[in-house]
Image: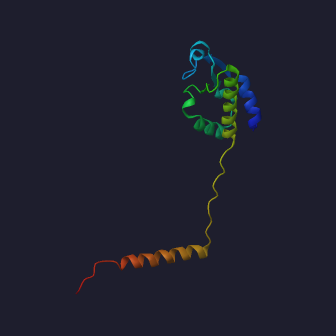
């Protein structure tokens, strides 16, 4: 199984970038200069293990297309270089989080004494509830 660091390095090599004009405030600079970065990555090319891929797909959500491409758009900063760095950092964080699989929950084990105590408590509670019927004066 490959590590997260190896996969991040491979993802950075496979990712393609395109620059688009950013939205939002910024005046004339925003209208003239394509500073926002769109990072595209074919997730199938990473060859992730099955549980990691499932978690990656869940974490990516709507950023992943039906063809298996991950699309990250970075436009927080005013320069291309800062947005490129931001997009690659977000990609790395996403992959690292996908490799961080949640621990499987261990099934709780109940011994014989605990089981009998639980059943006795249920019977007592049932008897209390059964005695709450309507009072008849026969």
Name which quarter of the figure residue 12 lies in: top right
Question: Which quadrant is home to the C terminus?
Answer: bottom left
Furthest residue in direction top, as rendered = 32
- Side of 69 where 129 appears, left or right: left
Task: Return the x and y of residue 56 as percentages of the image width and height.
Answer: 63, 36
Q: Nearer the viewer, residue 1 or 21?
A: 21
Residue 87 in the image: x percent, y percent? 66, 27
Point out residue 76 in the picture as x, y percentages from the top left corner: 62, 27
Quadrant assignment, res 50: top right
- Residue drawn 66% across the image and 32% down it: 90
Please say if 96 is above or below 16.
below
The percent coordinates of residue 137 (x first, y second) are 23, 86
Extreme-bottom residue of the structure? 138
Q: Quadrant of the N terminus?
A: top right
Q: Is residue 15 left or right of residue 126?
A: right
User: Which residue is found at the position 55% from the left and 23% from the top?
Assistant: 25
Q: Residue furthest left?
A: 138
Using the image as rendered, state which of residue 97 and residue 85 is in the foreground.
85
Q: Compared with residue 29, is residue 71 higher up or lower down, i.e. above or below?
A: below
């Amino acid at each position: 199984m490959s590590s997260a660091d190896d996969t991040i390095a491979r993802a950075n090599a496979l990712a393609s970038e395109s620059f688009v004009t950013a939205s939002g405030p910024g005046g004339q600079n925003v209208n003239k200069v394509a500073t926002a970065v769109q990072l595209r990555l074919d997730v199938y090319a990473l060859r992730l293990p099955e549980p990691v891929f499932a978690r990656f797909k869940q974490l990516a959500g709507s950023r992943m297309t039906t063809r298996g491409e991950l699309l990250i758009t970075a436009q927080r900063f005013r320069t291309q270089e800062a947005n490129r760095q931001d997009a690659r950092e977000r990609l790395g964080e996403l992959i690292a989080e996908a490799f961080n699989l949640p621990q499987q929950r261990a099934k709780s084990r109940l011994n014989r004494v605990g089981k009998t105590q639980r059943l006795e408590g249920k019977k007592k509670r049932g008897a209390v509830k059964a005695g709450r019927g309507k009072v008849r004066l026969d």
